[in-house]
Image: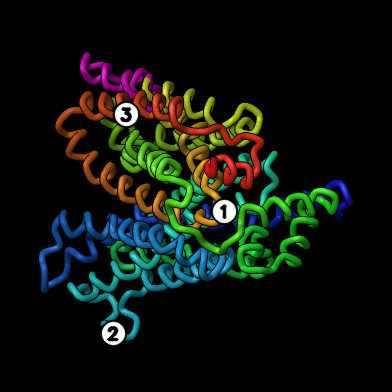
Amino acid sequence: MHTANNGSKRYLYSVTLVAVLGGLLFGYDTAVISGAEKGLEIFFSQAPDFLYNKLWHGLASSSALIGCVVGGLISGLLAARLGRRNSLRLAAVLFFLSALGSYLPEFLFFEFGKPTFNLFLMFNFYRILGGVGVGLASAVCPMYIGEIAPSHIRGTLVSWNQFAIIFGMLVVYFVNYTILGDHDNTWAASIGWRQMFVSEAFPAALFGLLLFLVPKTPRYLVLTGHDGKALEILTRINGAAKAGEILTQIKETSRAKNERLFAYGITVIVIGILLSVFQQAIGINAVLYYAPRIFEGAGAGGGGMVQTVIMGVVNITFTLVAIFTVDRFGRKPLLLIGSVGMACGAFAVALSDHFGLQGLVPVISVIAYAAFFMMSWGPICWVLISEIFPNTIRGQAVAIAVAFQWIFNYIVSSTFPALYTFSPMVAYGLYGVICLIAAVFVLKWVPETKGRTLEDMTRFWRK
């Protein structure tokens, strides 16, 4: 129920919950390979027509990232042409098809269970298809939530998307563990990896179905000339008294469906891109993707898996810290605290390597490094990307920023093993320096968006 002065929080939270399922699938799809890659390697190593070496295995393990870049690049065009909601529906379809295709890449064309080079290509096609879905969801989910949410809680609601990403990773870790159970490598190579990939079909189908119950965003409706529908949704979310005022502001800043990308100058675009670049360049995905190896190298027992689980729990906890403080303290303070905290953690790991320290100090330092990311750059970068761009160029600008994010994700993830092998001190020292540069960037360039409407930001850049 909503009144003239207050919208329906139940409705707002329900719509947000559906949208963040896209974030959960984002995390699920990018992490599912962690459990499946060993069985996949054994399966394709039996191929008679090509030598499946580490190079091919690296491609199979990271091919989804190619799709992520593509999905990020086309997200702006699709968000403008299809709308935010329909773009998420397309992402759900891509997640679903990727899950089924990765489970059965032999479908229609190949003999089941017979590894060949052509089958390898088909498998990667389906993984790239899922990556396109991830790229779309990573851009459009925070955009959708940002355009639905009232300004005073927008940061909190968009931050839930980051929580969903991390939660999706944790879910798939447990799903992979449950599927593998007590089975041996032979079973993992024949059936196990297939079941891990197809498990994504269930949340993907649920996401697609629930998207038929949520509305288009008011900002998109105004851009496409449906002011009446926009007012109806704004009334349901904000209350009748506030809805008319918000609609007027949206119309004032949305005179055209699209404007030139640089209609508001180059600065806002550069800031959006650098937010994405720094979120990846500070090295967090190197820690997340290679955590067991890092902890084992620091002297942790059991292959580092226990410490990895502990880090996962800490990550969830500190993401909640961001969620409950972003609209109270603002975006910039959290980014500054996180940048400095990450720098301290990275430098501590580098010094531990230099002085040969093992055990508690480097393990706690790595966990602290990840924790400071989760309370700052993890969720806050997505919040800012959904907020800072003017209404009429948001789709295009978010697409470019997200594409840069995936490109640097790939660069950091692919260079970390060689850099870490060369010297952990150099690797973490470099990330620590980048963290400090990121802090200076935030202090000097990034505007505070706390409490501002999306239309306030449009007027800000217009000046």
Compared across the picture, whether 33 is left or right of 325 comes to left
Please, which residue is most extreme toward the right here? 3
The residue closer to the viewer here, 265 or 192, is 265
Question: Mark 3 or mark 2, which has the lower sequence index?
Answer: 2
Q: Which-is-in-front pick, marks 3 and 2? A: 3
The residue closer to the viewer here, 318 or 248, is 248
Residue type at tag 3: Ile
The residue closer to the viewer here, 452 or 74, is 452
Q: Would you say residue 46 sits in the magenta stretch?
A: no
Compared across the picture, whether 222 is left or right of 91 comes to right
Q: Residue at x 48, y 34 (%)?
A: 374
Residue 244 location, x and y as percent? 79, 54
Q: Residue at x 28, y 67 (%)?
A: 124
Q: Label for residue 109? A: 2
Label 2 crowd bin: few (<14), some (14–19), many (20+), radius 10 Å: few
How many numbered marks appear? Answer: 3
Q: Residue at x 30, y 29 (%)?
A: 431
Residue 343 location, x and y as percent? 37, 23
Q: Would you say residue 354 sits in the magenta stretch?
A: yes
Residue type at tag 2: Phe
Q: Which residue was labeled with disc 1? A: 391
Please, which residue is most extreme toward the front here? 463
Q: Main secondary structure of the magenta part?
A: helix
Q: Label for residue 434? A: 3
Specify start and end residues of the magenta stretch as a single range. Answer: 344-366
Image quadrant occupied by the N terminus:
bottom right
